[in-house]
Image (spheres, helix red, strand yellow):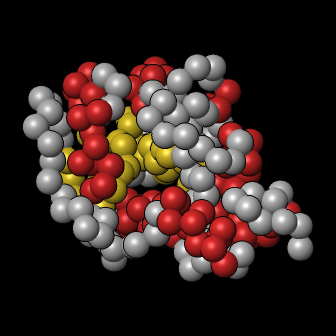
Amino acid sequence: MQRVGLLGGTFDPPHAAHLALARAALDAGAVDVIWVVPAGDPWQKSTEATADDRLAMTRLAFATMPQCVVQDLEIRRPGPTYTIDTVRAMQGAGLTVRCLIGSDTLAALPTWHAIEDLAHTTDFLVVSRPGTPVTPPAIPGLQVTVLPTDERTEASRDLRAAIRATGACPDGVDVAVWRYIVDHALYGTGHA
């Protein structure tokens, strides 16, 4: 069975920390391929860019990583986006699924929809994020593997704020993604 890493998120915008997480999982041999899945209607976060814009930016960000396949399955699915639904659909297609997250997301797992079911369904590959130690929460069945990687400081909310403040491409945003942001007047930019 193919081992697929599920890297989900809002990708609003995608950035170098997302790519570093994918590289860490691939370099560790923890997965064979990674499905990068932008959330359609994330129930815990609001997004600024549309789902179609976030999907397009994510495809640009991961274009140089052939083992990463950007999927639109959550964007096509109506209603709120829950990881448990995505994992079950992938497993129903015969895939072995491992969720890829940062330690900041690990700390927030207790707030996820059906987290106990998810913890019994799949395991989590985790990289350290600045200011958040890798401390697994007390969730029955939760299995965590820590992946070695250089900590990346990028966070989408900080990048959006930097874009608004400076109007310039912040570190951690790929040039192709930046061109898309400007061409589509996202995050307070205008057409160049």
As drawn, 129 above or below 77: below
Residue drawn at x 84%, y 66% is 190
Looking at this rendering, what residue extends furthest in the front direction? 165
Residue 60 shows up from this direction: no
- Work out which quarter of the rendered image holds the C terminus and state it: bottom right
129 left or right of 6?
left
Q: Could you say where residue 178 lies in the image, as x and y percent from the top left?
A: 72, 70
Q: Could you say where residue 62 lies in the image, as x and y percent from the top left?
A: 62, 61
- Work out which quarter of the rendered image holds the N terminus and state it: top left
In which quadrant of the rendered view does residue 66 lie?
Answer: bottom right
107 left or right of 154?
left
Residue drawn at x 73%, y 62% is 188
As drawn, 38 above or below 129: above
Question: Which of these two is toward me, 107 or 69?
Answer: 107
Question: Which of these two is toward me, 147 or 93?
Answer: 147
Q: Could you say where residue 148 lies in the image, as x and y percent from the top left?
A: 27, 69
Residue drawn at x 51%, y 59% is 157
Residue 85 shows up from this direction: yes
Q: Could you say where residue 112 lies in the image, as x and y percent from the top left?
A: 33, 31
- The count of marks equals 0
In which quadrant of the rendered view does residue 2 lie?
Answer: top left
Residue drawn at x 55%, y 46% is 10
As drawn, 84 above or below 20: above
